[in-house]
Amino acid sequence: MTTLILIRHGHTDWADKKLAGWLPDVHLSDQGKQQAEELPQRLAALNITAIYSSPLERTLETAQPLAKARGLRIHKVADLGEVKFGEWQGQTLKVLSHKKEWKIVQAAPSTFQFPDGESFRETQSRAVGAIEKIVAGHAQDTVVAFSHGDVIKLIVAYYSGIALDNFQRIAISPASISVIELGPVGARLGRLNDTGPLQNHQQPKK
């Protein structure tokens, strides 16, 4: 069984204000940097063998303290990157919330495609595909994947059997940890949106 640790990037100044998407130069705030520095201690009880990350700056900055503490390299995986918001990228949530499509994004996301971007179904497909490849190379290991709020929600929804139209009901906070155990007979959600230490998480016996 593979233990997958999903971690959302730390706080940024864009949080709850704008859709950063794939824009460059979106960095961690001071709060986010502190959250990243706390991750090695929060994960101290786990025997981590590999670290994967979205290639965007805010995720890499979140991953770096853990990678340094464990002496591990960060493997960049484009398919763990943020939703491709297309024309919505860079816009404020205040403006977007007044669009008629906003209700569709929240209530029926499986039917929506971002203008000049991708659909949530496409995001889920590529992200889950990336996770499947990672897991295939790490049987019996504990691995960490740094990604983004919506992407992690879509991954959790897939492995938990939650319909795509209900994935927005999942909350994933900045620097939160979610744990999925993946084995030959299926998946089990061990933690969700955890913001504390994981010393009580019992790893499967090898």
Image (spheres, helix red, strand yellow):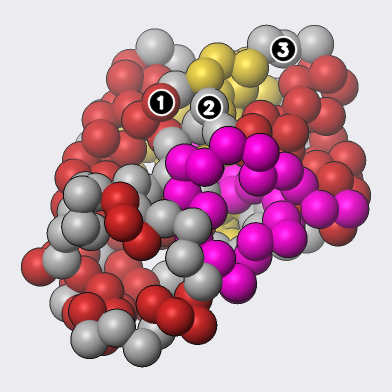
Q: Is residue 117 above or below residue 194?
A: above
Between label 3 and label 1, give the one nearer the viewer: 1
Q: Looking at the picture, how far across and down is residue 31, in whole percent?
A: 86, 57
Q: Distance between the residues labelled 3 and 1?
A: 19 Å
Q: How far apart are marks 2 and 1 (CA)?
A: 6 Å
Between label 3 and label 2, give the one nearer the viewer: 2
Mark 3 is surrounded, within 10 Å at the Cα level, by few (under 14), some (14 to 19) or many (20 or more) other residues, namely some
> What segment carries the magenta color?
4-30
Instruction: Tell me the tag on residue 72.
Output: 3
Asked whether the residues under the numbered discs 3 and 2 touch, taking CB atoms below 8 Å apart as contact, a structural biologist would say no
Q: Looking at the picture, how far across and down is residue 163, in whole percent?
A: 19, 67
Asked whether the residues under the numbered discs 3 and 1 touch, taking CB atoms below 8 Å apart as contact, a structural biologist would say no
Could you say whether the residue bearing mark 3 is in a helix, strand or loop?
loop
Asked whether the residues under the numbered discs 2 and 1 touch, taking CB atoms below 8 Å apart as contact, a structural biologist would say yes
* Three-letter code for the amino acid on which mark 2 is drawn: Pro
Q: In this view, does 192 lie above or below 140?
A: below
Q: Between disc 2 and disc 1, whose residue precedes?
A: 2
Any magenta on residue 23?
Answer: yes
Q: Please tell me in which quadrant of the rendered image residue 164 appears.
A: bottom left
Q: Looking at the picture, how far across and down is residue 68, in whole percent?
A: 83, 19
Any magenta on residue 41?
Answer: no
* Three-letter code for the amino acid on which mark 1 is drawn: Ala
Q: Between disc 3 and disc 2, whose residue precedes?
A: 2
Question: Residue sitting at 45 percent across and 16 percent down?
Answer: 138
Instruction: Tell me the tag on residue 78.
Output: 1
Front-most of residues 166 and 188: 166
Mark 1 is surrounded, within 10 Å at the Cα level, by few (under 14), some (14 to 19) or many (20 or more) other residues, namely some
Could you say whether the residue bearing mark 2 is in a helix, strand or loop?
loop
- Would residue 53 be seen by someone viewing this image from the given angle? yes
* Three-letter code for the amino acid on which mark 3 is drawn: Leu
